[in-house]
Image (cartoon, rainbow, N blue to C red):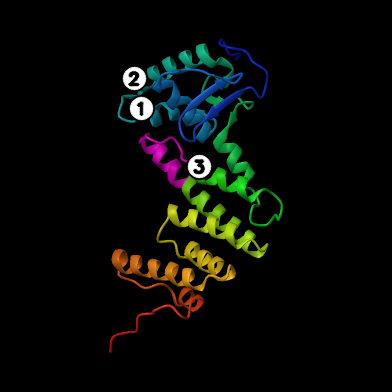
C-alpha cells in the first residue's frame, strides 16, 4: 500500500534512535508526536510485526480494541507526515526497507570486528561509545532493547580491544576495554584486557591499580575475589590470603 505522505528517493529517509529520537527526510528533521515516535522506534527495533502484536506492546495496559484504535491513529498520522517510511499491510506493519536506521547501521558495521584487521578502530570506538539508545524512554520493550544492545556493545568493545592488542596498539585496546568496563563494571573479561593493555604499554603500576580497583569493588559489592586467572596477570598485586 503506497504512502500518502512525502515521497522521496531511496536513501533519503533516516531514523535516529541514538542520543535522541530524530526522523529526517531529505536531511530535514520532521517533528512528530510521541505516539508516532514510539511506533516508528518499535518497528525499527523489532522489524515486521502483526498489528495486534504492535498494539499490545505499545499499549500494554489498554483493552485490545482501544489499543488497536490507538495504533490505527498512529499509523494514519505517521503516513501523513512520513508516508514512505511505513509499509502498511492488512495485518502487519514494518518500516520500509529503504529507511536508514542508525541502530541497524551500527550493528551491521560490527560484524566480524574481532576477526578482521581492517576497519578504523577510532571510528568504531566513537560509534560504540555514543550508542545510547533512546535516553529518557522507559517502556518495557525499550528497556529490553537497551539491555540487549548493551551486551552487544560490550562484546564488540572487547573484540575490538583484543584486535588492537594483537595488532600492537595497546592504547586503543585500553580505551576500548575501559569503555566496556564503564558499561559493566563487574565484568572480569573487560578488566583483564585493560590489565593486559597496561602491561603491553609498559605501565605495570597502572595494571596493578586496575586490578586492585576491581578487586575492591568485587569485595564491596559481591563479597568475592577476582579469579586466580586474573590475579596471575599481575603477580605484584596484593592478593588476599585465606584466613587460617
Q: Residues within 10 Å of mark 2 (few under 14, many from 20)?
A: few
Residue visible at 54% across and 16% down in the picture: 82
Q: Secondary structure at mark 3?
A: loop
Rounded to the nearest whole Å, what is the CA distance between mark 3 and mark 1?
Answer: 29 Å
Is label 2 in contact with label 3 (beta carbons under 8 Å)? no
| Mark 2 touches mark 1? (CB < 8 Å) | yes
Q: Is residue 44 left or right of residue 66?
A: right
Numbered circle sitting on residue 59: 1
Is residue 147 highlighted in magenta?
Answer: yes
Return the disc, 3 or 1, that comes first in the chain's sequence: 1
Badge nearest the viewer, 3 or 1 = 3
Of the residues under marks 2 and 1, which one precedes in the sequence?
Answer: 1
Report helix, strand or loop for mark 2. helix
In this view, the mark in front (2 or 3): 3
Circle 3 residues within 10 Å: few <14, some 14–19, many ≥20: few
Q: Mark 3 — residue?
A: 130
Distance CA(mark 2)–CA(mark 3): 37 Å
Nearer the observer, 162 or 98: 162
Q: Position of residue 51 (x, y in %)?
A: 47, 25
Residue 11 lies in quadrant: top right
In the rendered image, residue 122 lying in the magenta stretch gets the answer: no
Specify whether 115 is left or right of 227.
right
Residue at (40% x, 22% y) in the render: 35
Viewed as shown, does residue 223 lie left or right of 183?
A: left
Magenta part of the protein: which range? 130-148
In the rendering, at what x and y percent does residue 227 appear?
43, 74
Q: Which residue is mark 2?
A: 66
Amino acid at each position: 500500500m503506497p504512502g500518502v505522505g512525502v515521497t522521496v528517493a531511496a536513501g533519503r529517509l533516516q531514523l535516529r534512535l541514538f542520543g535522541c529520537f530524530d526522523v529526517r527526510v531529505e536531511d530535514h528533521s520532521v517533528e512528530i508526536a510521541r505516539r508516532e515516535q514510539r511506533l516508528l522506534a518499535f518497528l525499527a527495533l523489532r522489524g515486521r510485526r502483526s498489528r495486534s502484536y504492535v498494539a499490545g506492546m505499545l499499549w500494554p495496559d489498554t483493552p485490545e480494541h482501544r489499543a488497536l484504535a490507538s495504533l490505527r491513529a498512529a499509523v494514519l498520522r505517521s503516513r501523513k507526515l512520513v508516508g514512505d517510511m511505513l509499509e502498511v499491510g492488512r495485518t502487519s506493519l514494518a518500516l520500509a526497507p529503504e529507511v536508514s536506521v542508525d541502530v541497524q547501521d551500527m550493528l551491521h558495521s560490527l560484524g566480524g570486528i574481532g576477526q578482521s584487521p581492517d576497519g578504523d578502530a577510532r571510528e568504531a570506538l566513537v560509534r560504540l561509545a555514543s550508542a545510547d539508545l533512546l535516553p529518557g524512554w522507559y517502556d518495557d520493550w525499550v528497556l529490553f532493547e537497551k539491555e540487549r544492545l548493551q551486551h552487544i556493545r560490550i562484546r564488540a568493545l572487547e573484540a575490538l580491544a583484543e584486535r588492537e592488542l594483537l595488532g600492537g596498539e595497546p592504547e586503543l585496546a585500553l580505551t576500548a576495554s575501559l569503555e566496556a568496563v564503564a558499561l559493566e563494571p563487574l565484568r572480569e573479561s573487560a578488566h583483564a584486557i585493560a590489565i593486559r593493555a597496561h602491561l603491553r604499554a609498559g605501565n605495570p603500576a597502572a595494571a596493578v591499580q586496575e586490578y586492585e580497583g576491581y578487586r575492591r569493588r568485587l569485595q564491596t559489592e559481591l563479597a568475592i575475589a577476582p579469579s586466580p586467572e586474573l590475579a596471575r596477570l599481575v603477580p605484584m598485586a596484593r592478593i588476599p590470603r585465606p584466613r587460617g
